[in-house]
Image (cartoon, coloured by chain):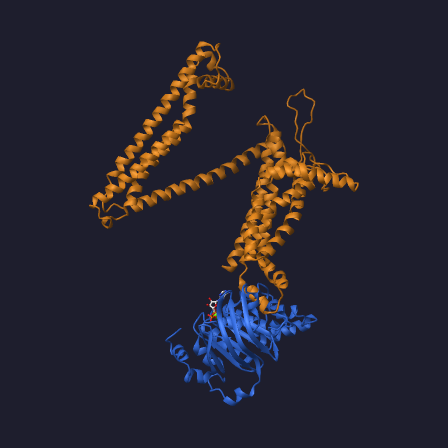
Amino acid sequence: MSLDQPVNDSEIMETEIKVSARGVGVFYGEANALRDVDIDFRQHQVTSLIGPSGCGKSTFLRCLNRMNDTVDGCRVVGSIVLDGQNIYSKDVDPVELRARVGMVFQKPNPFPKSIYDNIGYGPRIHGMATNKTEMDEIVESSLKLAGLWDEVKDRLDEPGTGLSGGQQQRLCIARAIAVAPEVILMDEPCSALDPIATAKIEELIDELRQNYTIVIVTHSMQQAARVSQRTAFFHLGNLVEQGDTEQIFTNPVDDRTQSYITGRIG
Amino acid sequence: MNTLLLIIALLAMTTLAYHVGRKRALASVGGNGHLLHSLPSYHGAYVALWCILPAAIIVFFWLSSENAIINSMMVSSLSLEQQDLSTAEINLILSEIRNIASGAIRSTNIDETKLALADRYGELQFLSTAGLIVVTMGIGAMGLLYSRRFIAPRFRARRWVERMVMGLLIACSIIAILTTIGIVLSLLFEASRFFTKVSPIEFLFGLHWSPQTALRADQVGSTGAFGAVPVFAGTLLITIIAMIVAVPIGLLSAIYMAEYATPHFRSVVKPLLEILAGVPTVVYGFFAALTVGPFIRDLGESVGLNVASESALAAGLVMGIMIIPFVSSLSDDVINAVPQSLRDGAFAMGATKSETIRQIIIPAALPGIVGSILLAVSRAIGETMIVVMAAGLSANFTANPFEAVTTVTVQIVTLLVGDQEFDSAKTLAAFALGLILFIVTLILNVIALTVVRKYREKYD
Ligand SMILES: Nc1ncnc2c1ncn2[C@@H]1O[C@H](COP(=O)(O)OP(=O)(O)O)[C@@H](O)[C@H]1O
Ligand SMILES: [Mg+2]
């Protein structure tokens, strides 16, 4: 496994920029929860967003697939460009965008449907499968990618809510993968899981990096160090510092980052 | 009047008792409240409870037995030949005496013995009231003095008070439970008397309902037919019409309110909708009978249909409107109980709002929605006033909503309204119908509540 090896700098520079945010700010009504965030996310890389709770990590993550549109009174400013197109421009349909930018939540939230239908839900609403065979293939390959196939292949008809917490979270990852997204957002995907389930998910994230651009919010610095190549530190609604994970954790530039990773603020 | 004064006096004494207990508790530790085992107010409450509880029990039993005792004393002072009269006639005499005593009958030609009896009655009543006051206040004072002696710094007044309060609560819930059991038993008992006269088979499967029986042997009249199927069918028909109105409107408005409406709109409209549930059913009844029924009849005539002015349709429509808030309010609650995380999950998959509602939220809330519909059905089945006023009385066995039909509740009302013999099959039939109604709504409620509860547990 490559998790513990130091990240090769040249590898990082080679990949292309997938998403680039410029001057992103978020208001909940009058409250300014996020200010002037500039950051790039590169292909085949995992970027961690860290910071004390309430600093705006989830808020920023939800800008990337326009989930904030569903929150009453929430306003986003600035631009977020995905493959050369500003996702906040008028002619982008958030529904199509969300098929390209998948999301996994803090608490596993499988639909109260069968395992099969949980995976099949996205492909069905996006018309990705024309017949049962194609759908079967999507379900199987998604579950395999999420490392869940062997555990559930004999009980695809059972409700997804009947799985263990870790399995449910992998089901949610498989569900996100099923619509063939380009970017996967994860908001503290392991915070409700035990260490073994967490290790499995971390392993999975590292594998998924081959095919996707991944942004993960985490409150665990060890996790950020284990899974990500780049890290961004948020504090009180500001993006304080970003850089290679190695550098952030060994040699942070900003005092606030220093305090946070040494455990003085949090 | 006297009783009211007595209650006020007793409450005043209880207040006094509270202060006495409190004062004494504080005095026992020289004003140093924290040396007491229990707060001074618990000591006060302890003395107060001792003051009021025994006295209240006395008042209750005294008042409930007073009439019977006075009556029997009056009977024993009647003349001997009068004592041999039938109970009904004795009661008549007694009520006459009572009326004389209270001054309701003011006539110059009342015979002497009756006047004397009336005097005696007034005397007995006065004695009883005076006795009640003396005994109650005495018991109250005794309770006060008795319990006062226990007040001491280490006395565990709090535990005693809490135990007494718990006893009180248990007594109240037992009363409620016993009442329910009593109602069920009387229903069972009377229904079983009916089934000795009419076979259950005939009652449950007979197609002809005509409960009028001849009162006298020589009377020309029907012999009575107790096939309840047309009555059940009428209830079913009206309930179906009501649900056809209530379920779509209630459910769709619940979806709108839970998923689309702004919080402000919702906070205004939801209570407004719930006002519908607060309109007295008799108001719905005359709305159905005087407005909707004739309107439907006229409408039917204008397209050449023959509609009775009392039709199942009119009653069902209005009942459906009455039930809307039951469906919408409960469904709104269960839809709101679907966790936000499921909505987020669906949105994040790229589902539109309507897809999310149709494919994720409604299926997740379905058990709860079914529960709310079942509760509404049981409400519709038991509803009486609207159907009495708007559905008619004729027990037609029909599925035509334009005809008059009758329902279980309407039949119970008509069987029991007016003077009745309480042992004729006609009257007892009401209990049999009531029993069936009770069983059906009970089953529906149990299913609905289990379904709703299961659903709640799933997300908590
Ligand atoms: N739906 C919302 N409405 C209003 N304020 C919100 C909402 N969501 C988050 N906030 C506020 O935005 C700030 C950032 O929150 P969040 O992004 O959830 O922080 P994090 O994920 O870093 O813990 C917090 O101060 C929070 O109170
Ligand atoms: Mg968060």
- Residue B92 vertical position relative to residue B16 in the rendered view, above or below: above
Query: Residue A242: image x %, image y %?
Result: 47, 81
* Extreme-right residue of the structure: B304
Of A68 and B42, which appears nearest the observer?
A68
Query: Residue B403: image x %, image y %?
Result: 72, 38
Task: Specify the colour of chain B.
Answer: orange
* Extreme-left residue of the structure: B30
Residue A225 in view of the camera: yes
State the residue at coordinates (64%, 21%). Answer: B216
- Residue B106 vertical position relative to residue B47 in the rendered view, above or below: above
User: Chain coloured blue: which letter?
Assistant: A
State the residue at coordinates (79%, 42%). Answer: B303
Query: Residue A130: image x %, image y %?
Result: 70, 71
Of A104 and B443, which appears nearest the observer?
A104
- Residue A142 vertical position relative to residue A111 in the rendered view, above or below: below
State the residue at coordinates (39%, 32%). Answer: B60
* Extreme-front residue of the structure: A30
Query: Residue B173: image x %, image y %?
Result: 43, 42
- Residue B156 vertical position relative to residue A34 in the rendered view, above or below: above
* Extreme-bottom residue of the structure: A10
Quarter of the view holding residue B12: top left
In which quadrant will I find the N terminus of chain B? Answer: top left
Quarter of the view holding residue A214: bottom right
State the residue at coordinates (55%, 51%). Answer: B268
Of A28 and B292, which appears nearest the observer?
A28
Left or right, residue B300 beside residue B280: right
